[in-house]
Image (cartoon, rainbow, N blue to C red):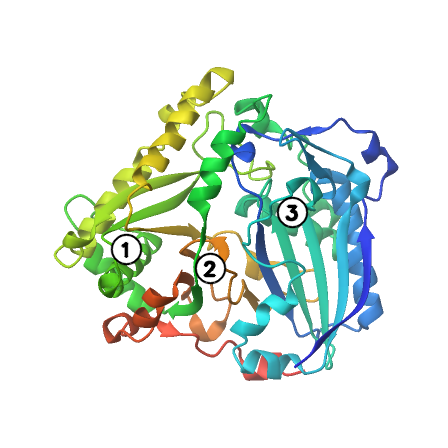
């Protein structure tokens, strides 16, 4: 299979008034977030539309331009780790042609091919944030007319909720449902609660970069857990302290324990779990889902290898729930305003200390299951599948797992886990019969009668 670039251009906000707006202040949490690209690939068979390739591209570009009028920070560039301006820099937009059919592409379970559908390498460290766009788009058109829309969102100002709000608005503008497009006026409310530091706290950013990224050889694998197996794992995770574990808690604990057991042949003697916690529902008053920025913190729990075998899943979940519970409304109040900066520094120092162990593996978990990425309808129906990424590079976001819904009727209520681990640990995990009793490795993606084109 070959993907050839047809064109490159830049999409800018439709209104000239955007260029007159003041610089957009990023929040303190954004200042402390390393620059890397979070990926997403949406697949559409295009059977339900009369539009041809050029018309599809024109519709996407025009609606993207209109959406950037409101989500103007995504058209700009970060300056001095303090602000975003230069909104006329715009969004890189690449068009490619794929010399195969979408059906054949997906039938081959294309993990290793996904990165070719993206405009930027996924989750690789970006050392020059001032040069990095906040969003880049790659429209991949297959021989049959089906498309894969590859998206690279800079994590500097985009978390999952920001991405979800933007995509919902872009899709609404594309299909002419303008009343459903986001019109929230206070996109910058995050910087009001967590004001940026001037000068930029570059030392603390450097600490976070060392925690996020590590030079190593990694493997990424996609596992699917069906509803029945998730229910069984939730039952195994029940305990006195957590009588009703969520499916994400159960899956995180199961993957964590399986990875710990798989690492017994390595030098690892300690594991740290980092669980992303969305802050929007915890702030008082609540922040809008449309707020632009990284409105999450990492809940951290440490586990020693000697306890891995004897600690049941319920024990892992209890410690995880305890860590997440510490990030609550009362705690967030201590981080608000300029006086909250010392408390944020304490938060980073705790993560640094718990991550400083010599023979340590840090596993990060993030749930995308409620972001609606399988319901992004640009006017030709929902995607038949959404992929994340294939293999990652050597200097990349270490040992990260993303959970997302399958979006397929053949896996109703199932959850996909996109797991990246040190290659030695993954080589054991992906052949572990106890793990595979619950996790299906990269099963078939599509409903054959729906996606043939």
Q: In the image shown, does 52 or 31 lie closer to the viewer?
A: 31
Quarter of image, res 70: top right
Q: Position of residue 264 (x, y in %)?
A: 22, 63
Mark 1 or mark 3, which is nearer to you?
1
Crowdedness of circle 3 by 10 Å Cα count: few (<14), some, many (20+)?
Answer: many
Residue furthest out toward the left: 310
Secondary structure under the numbered disc 1 in the rendered image: helix
Mark 2 or mark 1, which is nearer to you?
1
| Residue contact at pointers 2 and 1, CB within 8 angstroms | no
Disc 2 target residue: 404
Please indicate whether residue 46 sits to the left or right of residue 321 in the image.
Answer: right
Please indicate whether residue 451 sits to the left or right of residue 229 in the image.
Answer: right
Q: CA distance from mark 2 to mark 1?
A: 16 Å
Give the residue at x 45% y 36%.
207
Disc 1 target residue: 253
Q: Position of residue 414 (x, y in %)?
A: 40, 66
Secondary structure under the numbered disc 2 in the rendered image: strand
Disc 3 target residue: 166
Does residue 51 appear in the picture of this structure?
Answer: no
Task: Determine which of the numbered discs, if any, sits on residue 378 in the image.
Answer: none
Q: In the image shown, does 209 or 399 lie closer to the viewer?
A: 209
Which numbered disc, 3 or 2, marks the residue that appears first in the sequence? 3
Q: Position of residue 210 (x, y in %)?
A: 45, 43
Relative vertical location of residue 297 with respect to residue 222 in this rendering, above or below: above
| Residue contact at pointers 1 and 3, CB within 8 angstroms | no
Which numbered disc, 1 or 3, marks the residue that appears first in the sequence? 3
Q: In the image shown, does 185 or 441 lie closer to the viewer?
A: 441
Secondary structure under the numbered disc 3 in the rendered image: helix
Q: CA distance from mark 1 to mark 3?
A: 31 Å
Give the residue at x 32% y 65%.
425
- Image quarter hosting the C terminus: bottom right
Crowdedness of circle 2 by 10 Å Cα count: few (<14), some, many (20+)?
Answer: many
């Amino acid at each position: 299979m070959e993907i050839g670039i047809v064109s490159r251009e830049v999409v800018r906000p439709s209104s000239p008034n955007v260029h007159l707006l003041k610089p957009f202040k990023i929040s303190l949490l954004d200042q402390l977030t390393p620059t890397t690209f979070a990926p997403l690939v949406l697949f559409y068979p295009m059977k339900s539309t009369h539009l041809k390739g050029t018309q599809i591209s024109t519709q996407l570009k025009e609606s993207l331009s209109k959406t950037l009028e409101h989500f103007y920070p995504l058209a700009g560039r970060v300056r001095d780790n303090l602000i975003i301006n230069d909104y006329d820099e715009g969004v890189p937009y690449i068009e490619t042609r794929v010399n195969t059919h979408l059906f054949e592409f997906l039938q081959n379970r294309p993990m290793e091919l996904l990165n070719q559908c993206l405009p930027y390498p996924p989750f690789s460290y970006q050392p020059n944030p001032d040069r990095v766009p906040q969003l880049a788009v790659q429209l991949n058109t297959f021989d049959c007319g089906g498309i894969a829309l590859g998206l690279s969102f800079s994590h500097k100002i985009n978390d999952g909720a920001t991405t979800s709000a933007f995509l919902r608005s872009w899709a609404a503008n594309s299909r002419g449902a303008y009343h459903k497009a986001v019109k929230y006026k206070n996109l910058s409310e995050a910087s009001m609660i967590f004001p940026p530091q001037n000068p930029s706290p570059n030392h603390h950013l450097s600490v976070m970069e060392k925690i996020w990224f590590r030079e190593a050889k990694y493997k990424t694998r996609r596992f699917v857990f069906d509803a029945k197996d998730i229910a069984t794992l939730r039952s195994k995770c029940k305990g006195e302290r957590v009588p009703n574990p969520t499916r994400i808690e159960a899956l995180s604990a199961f993957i964590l324990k399986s990875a710990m057991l798989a690492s017994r042949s390595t030098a690892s003697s300690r594991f740290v779990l980092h669980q992303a916690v969305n802050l929007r529902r915890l702030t008082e008053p609540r922040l809008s889902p449309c707020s632009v920025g990284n409105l999450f913190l990492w809940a951290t729990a440490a586990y020693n290898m000697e306890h891995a075998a004897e600690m049941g899943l319920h024990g892992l979940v209890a410690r995880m729930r305890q860590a997440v519970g510490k990030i609550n409304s009362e705690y967030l109040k201590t981080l608000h305003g300029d006086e909250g900066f010392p408390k944020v520094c304490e938060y980073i120092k705790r993560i640094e200390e718990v991550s400083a162990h010599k023979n340590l593996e840090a596993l990060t978990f993030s749930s995308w299951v409620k972001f609606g990425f399988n319901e992004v309808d640009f006017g030709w129906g929902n995607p038949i599948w959404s992929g994340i990424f294939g293999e990652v590079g050597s200097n990349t976001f270490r040992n990260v797992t993303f959970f997302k819904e399958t979006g397929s009727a053949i896996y109703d209520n199932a959850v996909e886990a996109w797991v990246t681990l040190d290659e030695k640990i993954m080589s054991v995990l992906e052949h572990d019969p106890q793990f595979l009793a619950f996790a299906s490795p990269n099963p078939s993606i599509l409903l054959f009668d729906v996606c043939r084109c």
